[in-house]
Amino acid sequence: MTTEKKYILAIESSCDDTSAAVLCNTEVLSNVVATQEIHRQYGGVVPELASRAHQQNIVPVVHQALAKANIDKKQLSAIAFTRGPGLMGSLLVGTSFAKSLALGLDIPLIEVNHMEAHILAHFIKDQDTQRPEFPFLGMTISGGHTQIVQVNNYFEMKVLGETLDDAVGEAFDKSAKLMGLPYPGGPLVDKYAREGNPKAYPFPKPKVEGLNFSFSGLKTSILYFLQRETQKNADFVQENIKDICASVQHTILEILMDKLKLAVKQTGIKRVAIGGGVAANSGIRSRLKEAEETMGWKTYIPKFAYCTDNAAMVGIVGYLKFLEEDFTDQSAAAKARYAIGS
Ligand code: KG4
Ligand code: ZN
């Protein structure tokens, strides 16, 4: 790799976080994220509101990222942006902004696939975390994604399995909502689960062939279970919240770990790197640690700020593509659906 300093401005706007980052080669100089609070009151992301909030946020967020990095626009080597997948109205904001700025500054433009960015976030320079060696299995788990990918090289990835319906974060959030917890409920389920009995209420695991996932059945069985129990005792949820959360989380983790074990078995690859907001879950973290001891896996989790949606992960892909001179022209349009490797 070249040792020459390259400054990449990266922009992420695929869902409900407006983010801009400046990287100097693989090092993050700034990573500003404006999280849109407006969606909380609706219990989920409202696409039209997300798009409007991105329009308001993008200029100040980019300014802040440059200021924090202490970099002038004129020093930038290229601009990287998330082209997809994501919400169309949200992607349009980042895409249009990146294109005009690159045109104005007359520097290369680099398109980034958001799902590849979640995986390549592991290659951001960070003294506390290790970079996985190739090949490895990447599992991205968040409110919008659930995917297992075989990563042979930076740009040689193959999706082995993904969700057929809800994402794993949605499974957490929707279960939490059924228990009357505020959105997003994932962190609260995690918190209560730590003090509950994971075997208190067994929920069925979906029967999905191969490495694909399904979480919508779990939500339905939790709904019926809670309806049944609250008919008998109106205070059932309040009285048993810890055990219910522990049982729900246990079932979700079993589903994730079963698929990971199958992926390891099928590929013979024992390096597992996870990312996405659900990587914050204390249960998945301890399961992975356990797997290191019991099954000889090597596991990797990036710093939390690089797990949730952020522009630094877009910047690392931007830098890696810059080295390959893999640039995009002004005709690049946002892509709501954008498969890895396409
Ligand atoms: O990556 P992220 O910030 O946003 C996207 O979905 O793209 O992920 C947010 C998701 C939410 O569903 C949230 O409930 C979940 O990650 N989450 C957790 C935890 N922290 C965040 N789920 C379970 N346990 C956690 N500790
Ligand atoms: Zn994401």
Image: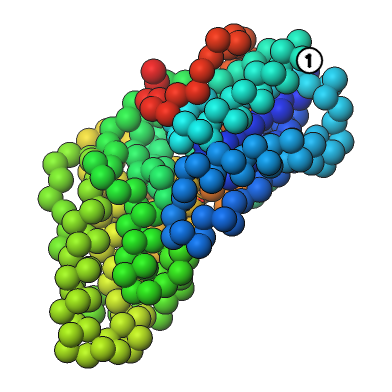
The residue that appears at 34% across and 48% down in the rendered structure is 167
Placement of 212 over or under 40, stated as above or below: above
Identify which residue, 162 or 283, lies in the foreground. 162
Residue 314, image x and y in percent? 59, 31
Quarter occupied by the C terminus:
top left
Quarter occupied by the N terminus:
top right
Taking the image as drawn, is residue 308 in sight?
Answer: yes
The residue that appears at 53% across and 31% down in the rendered structure is 91
Placement of 172 over or under 301, stated as above or below: below
The residue that appears at 20% across and 62% down in the rendered structure is 220
Placement of 96 over or under 205, stated as above or below: above
The coloring applied to the image is rainbow
Residue 326, image x and y in percent? 57, 11
Residue 103, image x and y in percent? 72, 13
Identify which residue, 24 or 129, lies in the foreground. 24
SS assignment at label 1: helix
Residue 140, image x and y in percent? 41, 43
Q: Give the residue pinned by disc 1.
A: 105
Identify which residue, 155 or 89, lies in the foreground. 89
